[in-house]
């Protein structure tokens, strides 16, 4: 995909490095980006290359007046030889996201402030002007910038209305909202001073239950530390979280599991045995289980994302 940016100085190397393409499911493709510049001050061109040629959205950090630099995205675009105008497509994508979110929240009967409708209408008006002025780079960019700023401001007001009304619904039952603030207890027992400070500042705690620590040798599991950590939580009235039970990175998996690298079925069998042993031991003692974390990192055991 190719995008022109005018004035060219708005397209910095840092912004280009952080740009990427996502599909309809919002999952990013590995994307290579580069900038083509001309010496005579002509618009810069951003090129994004990937292995797939499916349609997708471009995501890039972009300056928005009054809000600083935000991660914006275009609408769904197809690959083509003719370059798109980046500010215009970011405006189109931002307005589209706003209208979709507005429709979803109206469907659940959110009371929408008039300001949201006014700014949304203004944003659509500016987007329309930008779309019909594509042959005049400066004016197109100006209208697009205004459309983005108006859409972002409308989104801010809309989100505030959602928060206020959803919190009001939760408070109808009376009393304080049930809020948990917790700390991870780590792989060792807390000393007396740290324990006192944790109890003073938190009402929940997480017991990590890291496979690497609990089963350093295959088939031999050591539960002494988590036993005492969970008992400590219950003794002091702390809500007890535990996990993640499975984390697919080198810092969480036991070293002996590399013996089964490439043997997916055995990896699954070993993980299942470990998880079953942990859940069986602590069933009824843990308030919230974290089942898995970082499962899409691809950092361990030469596993594909699938």
Image (cartoon, rainbow, N blue to C red):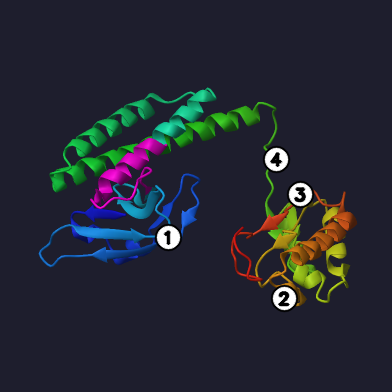
Q: Quadrant of the N terminus?
A: bottom left
Residue 148 in percent (x, y) is at 31, 42
* Circle 1 residue: 51
Q: Of callouts 1 and 2, which one flags the residue occurring earlier in the amino acid sequence?
A: 1
Could you give the CA–CA distance between mark 1 and mark 2, rounded to whole angstroms?
30 Å
The residue positioned 27% from the left and 64% from the top of the image is 35
Could you give the CA–CA distance between mark 4 and mark 1, rounded to whole angstroms?
47 Å
Give, as a single range, the part of the protein colored magenta.
73-97
Tell me if mark 4 has few (under 14), some (14-19) or many (20+) residues whose alpha carbon lies within 10 angstroms of its own: few
Tell me if mark 1 has few (under 14), some (14-19) or many (20+) residues whose alpha carbon lies within 10 angstroms of its own: few
Is residue 50 one of those drawn in magenta? no
Q: Between residue 162 and residue 12, name the one nearer to us.
A: 12
- 2 on left or right of 185: left
Q: Of callouts 3 and 1, which one flags the residue occurring earlier in the amino acid sequence?
A: 1
Instruction: Give the mark toward the camera: 1 or 2.
Output: 1
Could you give the CA–CA distance between mark 3 and mark 1, rounded to whole angstroms?
40 Å
* Circle 2 residue: 258
- Assess whether mark 4 and mark 2 are in contact (beta carbons under 8 angstroms): no
Q: Quadrant of the C terminus?
A: bottom right
Tell me if mark 3 has few (under 14), some (14-19) or many (20+) residues whose alpha carbon lies within 10 angstroms of its own: few
- 18 on left or right of 3: right
Q: Of callouts 2 and 4, which one flags the residue occurring earlier in the amino acid sequence?
A: 4
Q: Quadrant of residue 149?
A: top left
Could you give the CA–CA distance between mark 2 and mark 4, rounded to whole angstroms?
43 Å
């Amino acid at each position: 995909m190719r995008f022109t940016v005018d004035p060219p100085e708005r397209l910095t190397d840092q912004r280009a490095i952080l740009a990427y393409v996502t599909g309809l499911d919002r999952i990013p493709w590995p994307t290579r980006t580069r900038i083509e510049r001309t010496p005579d001050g002509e618009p810069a061109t951003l090129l994004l290359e990937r292995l797939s040629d499916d349609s997708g959205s471009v995501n890039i950090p972009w300056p928005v007046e009054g809000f600083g630099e935000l991660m914006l995205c275009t609408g769904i675009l197809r690959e083509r030889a003719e370059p798109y105008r980046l500010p215009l497509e970011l405006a189109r994508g931002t307005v589209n996201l706003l209208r979709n979110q507005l429709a979803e929240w109206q469907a659940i009967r959110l009371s929408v402030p008039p300001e949201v409708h006014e700014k949304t209408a203004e944003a659509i008006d500016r987007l329309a002007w930008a779309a019909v002025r594509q042959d005049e780079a400066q004016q197109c960019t100006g209208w697009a910038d205004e459309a983005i700023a108006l859409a972002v401001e409308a989104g801010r007001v809309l989100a505030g209305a959602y928060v206020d009304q959803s919190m009001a619904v939760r408070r109808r039952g009376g009393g304080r909202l049930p809020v948990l603030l917790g700390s991870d207890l780590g792989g060792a027992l807390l000393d007396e001073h740290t324990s006192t400070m944790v109890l003073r500042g938190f009402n929940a705690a997480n017991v990590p239950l890291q496979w690497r620590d609990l089963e350093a040798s295959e088939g031999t599991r050591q539960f002494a530390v988590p036993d005492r950590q969970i008992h400590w939580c219950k003794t002091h009235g702390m809500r007890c979280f535990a996990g993640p039970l499975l984390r697919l990175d080198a810092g969480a998996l036991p070293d002996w599991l590399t013996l089964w690298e490439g043997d997916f079925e055995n990896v699954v069998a070993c993980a299942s045995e470990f998880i079953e042993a942990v859940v069986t031991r602590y069933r009824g003692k843990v308030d919230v289980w974290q089942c898995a974390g970082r499962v899409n990192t691809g950092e361990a055991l030469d596993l594909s994302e699938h």
